[in-house]
Amino acid sequence: MPIRRRLADPDPDPLPSEGGAYALYFDIHAPVVLRIPRLENPHLDPGTYVYAGSAYAPGGICARVTRYLREDKTPHWNVDHLSAQLRCSKVETCPRARECDLIADLSATGADIPIPGLGSSDFRTCVSHRVRLAGG
């Protein structure tokens, strides 16, 4: 079961340093243009978006999520373009899991894929690693 946390709330439990999957939630209230020229600067309409990833390198989930949420970073991955413009509202972690499993679970609840291929270029099983939640 995922560990749920809101970043605005005090949380005595640190992010896990073991490997696994994580989901970053972003609430978008007005259209956002992602400054990614190679993808023709895609836009996201208002809603709640979730980016799923995994981290099995040293430092695990904690190191990866901490890097994504830092403000002083050079954008490298597609989620960096979103996290540079918007504050992450929630993080879920799933030690020993894979991001494709998180995306499958979210898709089963009605989440849609606003930009196919975004964030999943290294996976053949997922259409995207960013989804928009149903009703969001």
Image (tube, rainbow, N blue to C red):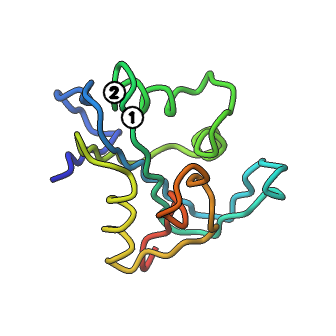
- When asked about the image quadrant of residue 6, the answer is top left
Q: Are marks 1 and 2 in contact (CB under 8 Å)?
A: yes
| Element at label 2 | helix
Dot 1: within a 10 Å radius of its alpha carbon, few (fewer than 14), some, or many (20 or more) residues?
many
Dot 2: within a 10 Å radius of its alpha carbon, few (fewer than 14), some, or many (20 or more) residues?
many
- When asked about the image quadrant of residue 74, the answer is top right
Residue receiving disc 1: 55
Number of numbered tags placed on the structure image: 2
Q: Position of residue 89 (x, y in %)?
A: 41, 48
Q: Position of residue 61 (x, y in %)?
A: 34, 32
The residue at 34%/39% (across/down) is 8
Residue 135 higher or lower than 82, as above or below: below
Residue 108 higher or lower than 10, as above or below: below
Between residue 20 and residue 7, name the one nearer to us: 20
The label number, if any, that marks residue 60 in the structure image: 2
Horizontal side of residue 59 vs 4, given as left or right: right
Marks 1/2: CA–CA distance: 5 Å
The residue at 33%/59% (across/down) is 102
Residue 15 higher or lower than 82, as above or below: above
- Identified by mark 2, the residue type is Gly
The residue at 36%/19% (across/down) is 58
N-terminal label among 1 and 2: 1
- Identified by mark 1, the residue type is Ala
Horizontal side of residue 19 vs 122, given as left or right: left
Horizontal side of residue 32 vs 102, given as left or right: right
